Amino acid sequence: MFSSLITRLYKTDAQKNNTVPDKPQKHKQSINVLEHSILDIKGTFLKDFELFHHETRLLIDLLIFLPHYGLYFGEKISWTAEELKNAKVEPFSKKNKKNSTTRLKTTEKILHQKLEDVLSFDSTPIQRFLWMEHLCESEFDALHSSFQTLLSKERVIFADDDIQNIQEKLFSLNTYQEIPFSKLKVLGSLQAHTLLLPTLKNPFGAFLSNEQQTFLDAPIEMSTITILQGTATTGKSTVLIRKVLHALLKNSDTKAVIFTPTILSGEILRKEFISLCDFAAVTLDYSRLIFLTPPTPQETIDINPLPKDASIIIYDDFYPFNATFTDQFQANIQERSIFISSSLPSENHLCYFLTEVYRAPTVKNIQLSHAKEAIVSLLTQLEPLFQSETPISVLVVLPSEDLLLDYKKTIDDCFRIECQILTSSFSLQYKNLDSVTLATPQYIAGVCVPHCYVINLSIDTPEYSMALSRASHSVTVISEEIHSISH
């Protein structure tokens, strides 16, 4: 049985002088050979993998997933033959009072705990190995016999191992499984803080798209405004909160502020953030993240009064705001990084683009040509829903606030209900989105209901696609003008 607990009994002359011998040039490409050996057998190879589990942050040198074999993790050992000359090793124990030179045992324990916490039940085999970055097998064989006694060569990948040798060693550590392990379940669980939350269709969540992952992996630059541009349903809010969470997990001193256009959208985003932390089995001090909502969506926001130690500022759903908004932020940016999600283009700031739609509703189109028939058509569409025994949750999006009270009175009188109107101060602490809710586009950020009715919105505006994206099941478009509606 391989022991990962290794201590050096004494130092070489090079170590005593605090000098490191030059690394052999012939070994520099060994990491490429290791990576290619994994990709060659359809595996996944990850370097410097950050694992977050509750309060623990662990950096794993090498993480490998092979669908038919399971999970492997490795620790990089930078010893050279010159450093190990005249040295010997012994197993770590409390008796000899030496410190372990590897973290393999601790890493394996945390990996098992992480998988168990996310999946509830997990049987993924996990094997560990050492990667001798600068040591050849022949050099290893020439070392003191204690190295051969303690270290099983089957669990050591040497600098001169070729692709075939590496693959054979990995295969020998685990048993081949006819039914492959799921990459989503295994690697997804280990990086669950970046996954899309589980749904009935995807009970283990889903990986981000390549575009979303590129934005998530991009470095956070101070004194910079970054625009995350994309239409509705491309996942701007989704990837923004994962960006914030990742930053908070990586640095315990980081604080962030998230602006949302309405209290409701802030509540929905906060709920998703907390659910993501619970799903990912990570523990976070929520006081390091502040959600704020301006009194009205069009109001200018002064970031000067914000906590001085808040280094990340997020503004979600930027589409209702005027063109001077980013200029005002730029003037007061200080040593902060500002991220803004928007459906509008920007030429003066760093931009990332999301084009892939990952949540598209099933849309039903109704087109009317009579100028005063929109409300009648809406009532006709609503009637079967009220006759059903299933509770309804319907959003009606109107083009202007002037229509809200008229539509509310007509619907209330017709169905003897009390429908509600979304405003910037609407809160789920006192109300819910059951029954019929009326709103104009600037107040529907974050909302998701089964059915949505879009009344007389111009199809050429961002508000139109935003309104369509609020439905998870179906959309009815009611227009008093004859035109072709595209999606």
Image (tube, rainbow, N blue to C red):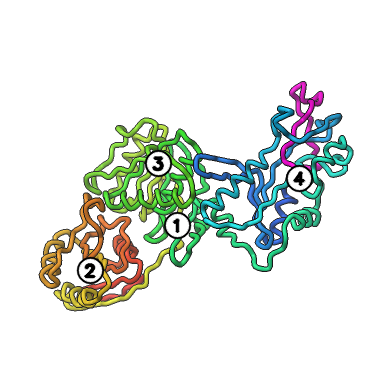
Given contact means CB atoms under 8 Å apart, are the residues at marks 1 and 2 in contact?
no
The first of marks 2 and 3 along the sequence is 3
Amino acid type at image mark 4: Phe
Q: Earlier in the sequence, mark 1 or mark 4?
A: 4
Dot 2 amino acid type: Ile
Secondary structure under badge 4? loop
Q: Which mark is residue 338?
A: 3
Mark 3 lies on a secondary structure that is strand
Cα separation between marks 2 and 3: 35 Å
State the mark number for residue 455.
2
Circle nearer the N terminus (3, 4): 4
Q: Tell me what residue is drawn at x 60 percent, y 50 percent.
A: 112
Q: Secondary structure at mark 1?
A: loop
* Mark 4 surroundings within 10 Å by alpha-carbon count, few (fewer than 14), some (14 through 19), many (20 or more): few
- Residue 2 shows which numbered tag? 4
Q: Badge 2: few (under 14), some or many (20 or more) residues near its Cα, within 10 Å?
A: many
Q: Earlier in the sequence, mark 1 or mark 2?
A: 1
Q: Residue furthest front?
A: 95
**Is label 2 in contact with label 3 (beta carbons under 8 Å)?**
no
Q: Residue at x 69, y 60 (%)?
A: 69
Distance between the Cα atoms at labels 3 and 4?
49 Å
Query: Which of label 3 and label 4 is nearer to you?
Result: 4
Residue 85 relative to residue 257: left or right: right
Considering only vertical position in the picture, is 238 above or below 293? below
Span highlighted in magenta in the image: 1-28
The amino acid type of the residue labelled 1 equals: Leu
Task: Decide which of 127, 273 is in the foreground and name it.
Answer: 127
Give above or below for 352 relative to 4.
below
Q: Nearer the viewer, mark 1 or mark 2?
A: 1
Residue 54 position in % (x across, y down): 50, 43
Q: Which residue was labeled with disc 1?
A: 197
